[in-house]
Image: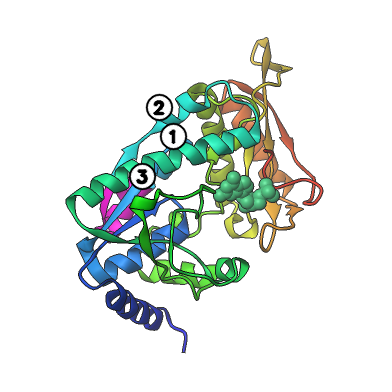
């Protein structure tokens, strides 16, 4: 029978058998899959596991802290944090093309992860890399396994030849809802377990225009309000994803307080979906939309207009870039 403790026992035994007394490395993204995969491996082999969290500076409010503090407190995992925000923002400076943003972020990610992996490997003989591959990913990619590189969440190429690892993939037989159940049974932070899917390139592809610290701060503030109000309305699990998008190169005239303003719009993009291949715009209650709009325009001075995206996918994608 499928119970979380059965699956955990089974996976822990399998991981121990595979890994033996060798060292293991795992990249954390802030998402649920890598968090649960790492927690399982930690159950199995404890401090033979070192996790690496590359903070690219493009996560939402509180998410880096969630990994660095709450997750570590919940698991006791050995974590190496690389604060790479300057490097990513430097590489992204002035870039507006969506695919170029993705390429740059993918490239920088693999370089930073590679350097961190080399440091970990210099201290111990690392043979294994954990990946949070789920059953649907296995099916989609034809079921292969073996040595590979970091792909999950980051759409990047691979590690160099001299830095290849064997894969540990403890979620290979599981669906997302099962992974969440395991994560809860393992005592991981609820906010991580119920986190909506979030793109590897992060907020960089939710700023339409060039990315910089000021724009990121504006988007983070607006996004946090949208998330808070969605949660307060009890609708977290009723939507699949809720991107908030900053139209950083667009301005419109508004009136706030005593004067006219010339600020930026943000777009609310709540969607319902089963698998992100197709999606429909979520019919959020108008009072929730209204609270989000009022709070954003009151609390984020750079934003003077909030618009709602009512496009399904297709023809629109979920993200704006
Ligand atoms: P679209 O925008 O194509 O997105 O409808 C489908 C799903 O994929 C996510 N997404 C990404 N995830 N790297 C990722 O890891 C990316 O570059 C990327 N682009 C889109 C998106 O959030 C949605 O869940």
Q: CA distance from mark 2 to mark 1?
A: 8 Å
Dot 3 beta carbon under 8 Å from ligand 1? no
Q: Are marks 2 and 1 in contact (CB under 8 Å)?
A: yes
Quadrant assignment, res 250: top right
Tell me the residue at 45%/31% (across/down): 88
What range is drawn magenta here?
67-79
**Mark 3 and mark 1: span between their CA atoms?**
18 Å
Upstream in the sequence, badge 3 or badge 1?
Answer: 1
Residue 193: x and y in percent read 46, 60
Q: Residue furthest front?
A: 161
Horizontal relation, residue 307 to residue 183: left or right: right
Residue of label 2: 86
Going 58% across and 55% down the picture, which residue do you hit?
Answer: 236
Tell whether label 1 touches label 3 (CB within 8 Å): no
Where residue 57 is drawn, which disc sits there?
A: 1
Given residues 119 and 65, the one toward you in this image is: 119
Q: Main secondary structure of the magenta part?
A: helix
Q: Residue furthest left?
A: 123
For discs 2 and 1, the disc positioned in front in the rendered view = 2
Instruction: Give the colouring mode of the picture.
Output: rainbow
Position of 168 relative to 278 (above/below): below
Q: Which residue is mark 3?
A: 114
Q: Quadrant of residue 148?
A: bottom left
* Upstream in sequence: badge 3 or badge 2: 2
Q: Residues within 10 Å of mark 3 (few under 14, many from 20)?
A: some
Q: Which mark is in front, 3 or 1?
A: 3
x, y percent for residue 188:
37, 61
Identify the image quadrant of the C terminus. Answer: top right
* Ligand 1 under 8 Å from disc 2 Cβ: no
């Amino acid at each position: 029978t499928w119970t979380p403790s059965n699956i955990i026992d089974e996976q822990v035994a399998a991981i121990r058998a595979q890994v033996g007394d060798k060292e293991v490395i795992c990249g954390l993204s802030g998402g649920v899959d890598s968090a649960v995969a790492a927690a399982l491996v930690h159950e199995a082999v404890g401090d033979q596991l070192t996790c690496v969290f590359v903070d690219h500076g493009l996560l939402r409010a509180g998410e880096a802290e969630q990994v660095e503090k709450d997750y570590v407190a919940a698991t006791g995992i050995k974590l190496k944090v690389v604060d790479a925000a300057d490097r990513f923002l430097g590489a992204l400076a002035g870039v507006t093309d969506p695919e170029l943003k993705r390429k740059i972020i993918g490239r920088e990610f693999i370089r930073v992860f590679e350097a961190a992996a080399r440091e970990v490997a210099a201290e111990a003989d690392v043979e294994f890399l954990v990946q949070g591959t789920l059953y649907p990913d296995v099916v989609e990619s034809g079921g292969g396994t073996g040595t590979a590189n970091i792909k999950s969440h980051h759409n990047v190429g691979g590690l160099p030849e001299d830095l290849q690892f064997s894969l540990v993939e403890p979620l290979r037989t599981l669906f997302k809802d099962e992974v969440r159940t395991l994560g809860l049974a393992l005592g991981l932070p609820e906010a991580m377990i119920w986190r909506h899917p979030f793109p590897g390139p992060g907020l960089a592809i939710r700023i339409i225009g060039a990315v910089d610290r000021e724009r990121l701060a504006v988007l983070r503030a607006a996004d946090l309000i949208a998330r808070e109000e969605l949660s307060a309305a009890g609708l977290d699990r009723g939507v699949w994803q809720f991107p908030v998008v900053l139209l950083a190169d667009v301005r419109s005239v508004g009136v706030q307080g005593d004067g006219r303003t010339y600020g930026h719009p943000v777009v609310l993009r709540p969607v319902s979906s089963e698998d992100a291949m197709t999606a429909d715009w979520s019919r959020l209650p108008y009072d929730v939309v209204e609270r989000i709009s009022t709070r954003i325009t009151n609390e984020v001075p750079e934003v003077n207009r909030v618009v709602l995206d009512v496009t399904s996918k297709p023809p629109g994608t979920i993200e704006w870039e």
